[in-house]
Amino acid sequence: MIFKDYYKILGLDTNKVNIDEIKIAYREQAKKYHPDVNSGDNRAEERFKDINEAYKILSEPTTRKKYDRMWNSHIGKKKSKIAKKSTENTKKTATRGEIFNALFGIENINDEGLHKNKNSKVPTQGEDIETEIPISIIEGFFGQTKKISLRTVSGKMKNFEINIPAGIRNGEKIRLIGQGKPGTNGGKNGDLLFKIKIIEEKKYKLIGADIYTDLNISPWEAVLGTKVEVDAIDETIGVYIPQGIETGEEIHISNKGYKDNKGGRGEFIIKIKIMIPKNITEKERELYRQMKKISKFNPRDL
């Protein structure tokens, strides 16, 4: 028989791969050629047996090390020569029995015994399932328990209770072990992952560990300065507005923002918006006229 390139059987071009890459490749190939999805296809059945055989060898460090020596001899160092000889219909050959003899030190194994061994089913872990949970900034800051209903792979609705820890960050995942797709051949179930999405609110906006909020003030408050109370995420803060502040300027308050996962907190950042009154009394209008007459301020000269 032709020497079997187990890496190629798993869809890998080289033996310079780690065990995780081998597992991923095995799952992809096993899913593609599984008898359940290729009913009556003898070639797919044989390919599935080869895939299990390849995974059994390459997933064990000892047998993989021995096989790699043979792979380098047949494929690695002489890859270009083998490619050339293949066009001339000359190929390096080795029986399955010879391969297993080299790997396991079993001398009297034949292809019939090996064929029987290939039929053994390899436990495969089920796939993970990921979904997204939208939460508010306040919910993320304080943490809470949420009840989620999801439709399972079998089509039935199932309830889950998710404990969201205080200070969870946007994009973090909460994992429920064994709640994903079921494994096959005795393999473990996959996991269910909930990805956190912190949504923006009308009042607060989260960037990193900093919380932003807008503060509307009047023109006279901007000119004269004032003190106002602002609702931070977990308390009310007295804030001094300096004289001459302009729209777009920011006031930064340290350690009053979102939790930073280091035992501290980000900043609470107040963005100023100067609001012009739309409806004014005649007296107010007259005061504005007087100000126009006496003021030498011209913003276009700045």
Image (cartoon, rainbow, N blue to C red):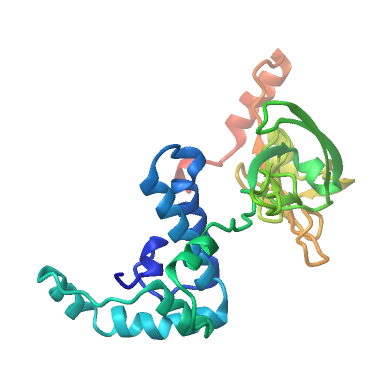
**How many marks can you see?**
0
Vertical relation: 74 (above or below) 48: below
* Residue at (70% x, 37% y) in the render: 134
The quadrant of the picture occupied by the N terminus is bottom left
Residue 144 appears in which quarter of the rendering?
top right
Q: Residue 260: image x %, image y %?
A: 75, 61
Vertical relation: 99 (above or below) 256: below
Vertical relation: 45 (above or below) 103: above
96, 293: nearer the viewer: 96
Q: Residue 62: image x %, image y %?
A: 56, 83
Residue 216 appears in which quarter of the rendering?
top right
* Residue at (38% x, 83% y) in the render: 70
Q: Residue 59: image x %, image y %?
A: 55, 71
Q: Residue 288: image x %, image y %?
A: 64, 26
Q: Is residue 55 left or right of residue 268?
A: left
82, 267: nearer the viewer: 82
Q: Is residue 62 left or right of residue 290?
A: left
* Residue at (77% x, 62% y) in the render: 261
Q: Is residue 155 left or right of residue 53?
A: right
Question: Most extreme residue toward the left, as rendered?
Answer: 88
245, 119: nearer the viewer: 119
